[in-house]
């Protein structure tokens, strides 16, 4: 049986923490969809097109990974794409309560046995978030090593 999983997030922009999770998740399944959530209520720093482009810049070495974007409920999208599990990363303790709440809500919405699968973020990136990275970058701070090099080059190009 082919195993299909979905790694979902805002990826605004993709960080090295995200990329590590993509690499590791891709080994756990036959097909990994990296789904960029487009939330009209949450204005992102980068457009969905730019976020997808930055993802595509760094996943070309993984032949079982594809990128996509979606609007609306994650639960509906996961069902539509026919995945067995939705992957989320956990950084130390700070993500736990929010993730637990979302996982319970999604389990209620899935009603079809889709699992939420948590992977611990690499400790080297446990303090890294897209929001923090883009704020530091915006004010001219050095974010080298926190986002993949091609992503940083693109952020500089479209600044
Ligand atoms: O990377 P993020 O911003 O922490 O990802 C959050 C995300 C995209 C997983 C969450 O906002 C989401 O699922 N958005 C889609 C709308 C939805 O389903 N909301 C209810 C979640 S229980």
Image (cartoon, rainbow, N blue to C red):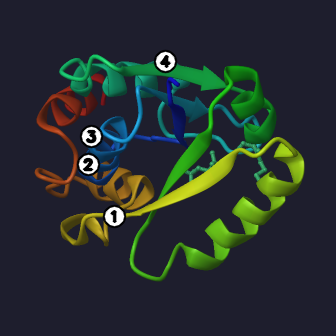
Viewer-side label of 4, 2: 2
Q: Which residue is identified by label 2?
A: 20
Whether label 4 touches label 2, CB < 8 Å: no
Q: Which residue is identified by label 1?
A: 121
Q: Position of residue 10 (x, y in %)?
A: 54, 42
Task: Tell me which label, 4 or 2, sits earlier in the chain.
Answer: 2
Q: Which residue is identified by label 4?
A: 49
State the residue at coordinates (73%, 39%).
Answer: 74
Task: Tell me which label, 1 or 3, sits earlier in the chain.
Answer: 3
> Which SS class for mark 1?
loop
> Which SS class for mark 2?
helix
On the picture, is 115 further left or further right than 89?
right
Task: Tell me which label, 3 or 4, sits earlier in the chain.
Answer: 3
The C terminus sits in image quarter = top left
Whether label 2 touches label 3, CB < 8 Å: yes
Viewer-side label of 1, 4: 1
Q: CA distance from mark 1 to mark 2?
A: 8 Å
């Amino acid at each position: 049986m082919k195993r299909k999983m979905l790694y979902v997030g805002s990826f605004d922009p993709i960080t090295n923490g995200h990329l590590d999770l993509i690499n590791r998740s891709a080994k756990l399944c036959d097909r990994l969809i990296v789904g960029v959530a487009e939330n009209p209520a949450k204005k992102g720093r980068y457009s969905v097109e730019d976020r997808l482009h930055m993802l595509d810049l760094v996943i070309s070495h993984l032949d079982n990974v594809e990128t996509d974007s979606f609007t609306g409920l994650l639960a509906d999208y996961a069902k539509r794409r026919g995945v067995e599990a939705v992957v989320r990363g956990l950084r130390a303790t700070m993500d736990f309560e929010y993730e637990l709440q979302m996982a319970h809500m999604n389990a209620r919405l899935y009603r079809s046995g889709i699992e939420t699968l948590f992977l611990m973020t690499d400790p080297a990136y446990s303090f890294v978030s897209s929001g923090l990275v883009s704020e530091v970058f915006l004010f001219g701070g050095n974010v080298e090593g926190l986002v993949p090099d091609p992503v940083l080059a693109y952020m500089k190009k479209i600044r």
